[in-house]
Amino acid sequence: MCGIVAYIGRREASPILLEGLKRMEYRGYDSAGMAVLDGDLRVGRAVGRVAALEEVLEREGGFEGTLGIAHTRWATHGGVTEANAHPHRDDGRLGHGIAVIHNGIIENHATLKRYLVEKGHVFTSETDTEVLAHLIGELYRGDLEKAVQSALREVTGAYAIAVVCEKEPDVLVAARKGSPLMIGVGKDEYIVASDSSAIVAHTTQAITLDDYTVARLDRESFRTTNVDNDPVSAEIRELEYDLGQIDLGSYEHYMLKEIHEQPEALRLCMKGRVDLRSGQIVLGGINQFARDLARAKRVIFIGQGTALHAGMVAEYLMEDLAKIPTDVEFASEFRYRNPIVEEGTVVVAISQSGETADTLAALQEAKQRGAMAIGLVNVVGSSISRETDAGVYLRVGPEIGVASTKAFLGQVCVATMLAAFTGRRRFLAAEAVRDLMERMSEVPGHIERILEQSDAIRDATARYVERDNWLFLGRGYNYPVALEGALKLKEISYIHAEGMPAAEMKHGPIALIDEGMPVVFLATRNSQYDKVLSNIEEVRSRGGHVIAVATEGDEEIRDRVHEVFWVPDVPEPLQPLLTVVPLQLLAYHAALMRGRDVDKPRNLAKSVTVE
């Protein structure tokens, strides 16, 4: 979602702020802005990329000063205009010179705006954030920290903010509730950011702010309180990755880099967790809850988008390997429909960032109803990881591309280990666990072989890339992969695609198939292989062109399809770890051929931190 970066220290702020904004470009945004304080407060804003903001700053002679805030906006309240871009200022007639940047949504902004208008405030934008700037200005009595605390006591909603004031040129105030924010701690300097990618070039030490925490920073020190001005302890920790991990290196796009990082990402995900000698799975984050997990009467996986698809694979795994009734739910629906959470229910939240707003809120709802909460997240110290009773980090490294790739494989890999870990404590024999884990340890090497087909996948994609409607079909474990393949194609190429169970095609969608329509089948050798072959014939007889993901050595399928991408033979529960990879490459090549911005698809954000 939107990006925040702020700086106070001894160095010039604007180069650091611009660098931070560029490192957060992957989050998705439509405008950018900066405010720097050097006596007077100077504000520059622009619609479009950070490069457009740089042009504005150059035209205005550059912004000098060692205290500043900057922001990339993804429009929520109000259109994509310069007036709606951040930072927003308080009412100039008061003379405070306050500027605010904000991620999140102020839900009671309309009520607050009416109050402020009655007080004589004049608004210049359509945003909820400007309300916060005016409210802080209205409450300012010479102490910016106290004004921010007072304002936030009146606010309903989610926020991560950074605030500066002309009257206090040596103070930066930051606060959060429900939207991520951290403080990088350097030598006589601090960098506030919504993402560690904006910090790692300058320091490896950071504080992750908890909800309702307000931080007051000057160049030598900081203090943290809550909105009632009670002291709050802050723990400085090491960031979980370094600058080298977020550089593009020799790759043209982050998505391609992350697709190729998947073999090593899975090796790191499994490292220290799979003991092939004993047939044991070691998940330190949930060991103390192993008995509760084994006695669970029901498991519910919650997520959104790609994480939801991983949860659908996890549903198959948990019922197959652990024999526990399992459901998977859209987090956004779960929290609003009065869900049934009985005694013995375990809710597993899946999120790459650990900050997905709907997933976090659904997890909190489940906990209030008595569920045990487990998190499968990638970002250490994220909101979901702090909210859960237990959890397992993916450990696949930072994911910059908006379209998730290696995080999906990490989520499925951890879900496989979780299901086998639980199953071993119920009905699964040690030998069965050992065999499955031995085969899973071979998956990274298998993926490396699949990646060698990239050119062949590109050539096949080129034959169909002009078609505007695609179907992705699969059964069993590969049904969620069909959904994920369709999502990838939609996300980055803007081609309309639908994923569904292969048998569902006959219940309506078969009417869509016409001459030359691309239909992608997950057609690996598995328990429903013969059924899939029958579905392929139904598509071909109506003129559809079949692209199959099939098992190496399957000569039978060659003559039944127009294109085939091969994956090595693995047990059925492990097939999603392989079958998704050709679909990632297909989407990537299709997007390039259509001239899309692969890493920054329109209208999308990497982490959806507001509803």
Image (cartoon, rainbow, N blue to C red):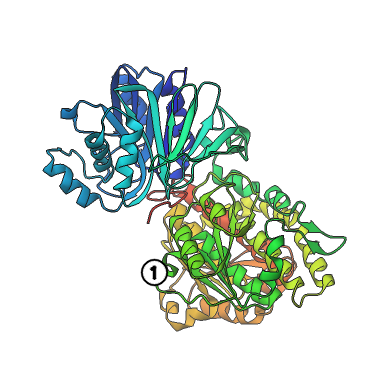
Question: What residue do we see at 32% from left, 29% from top?
Answer: 143
Image quadrant occupied by the C terminus: bottom left
**Tag 1 residue:** 336
Q: Is residue 533 left or right of residue 493?
A: right
Q: Is residue 267 above or below residue 330?
A: above
To which quarter of the image does residue 288 belong?
bottom right
Q: How many marks?
A: 1
Q: Position of residue 509 (x, y in %)?
A: 43, 77
Nearer to me, 384 or 301: 384
Badge 1 element: loop
In the image, residue 605 lies at what x, y percent?
43, 49
The disc labelled 1 sits on which kind of residue? Answer: Tyr
Q: Vertical placement of 44 versus 117: above or below?
A: above
Query: Foreground: 553 or 36?
Result: 36
Query: Where does residue 131 sit, x and y in percent of width and height?
Result: 24, 42
> Taking 460 as reference, is 39 above or below it?
above
Residue drawn at x 61%, y 75% is: 476
Q: Indicate the position of residue 156 as horizontal and vertical percent values.
A: 32, 52
Mark 1, other Cα within 10 Å: few <14 / some 14–19 / many ≥20: few
Q: Which residue lies furthest to the right in this view?
A: 277
Measuring 62% from the left and 33% from the top, which residue is drawn there? 244
169 left or right of 109 in image: right
Q: Is residue 129 visible?
A: yes
Q: Is residue 521 visible?
A: no
Compared with residue 475, is residue 149 higher up or lower down, i.e. above or below? above
Nearest to the observer: residue 529 or residue 395: 395
Q: In which quarter of the image is residue 497?
A: bottom left
Image quadrant of residue 553?
A: bottom right
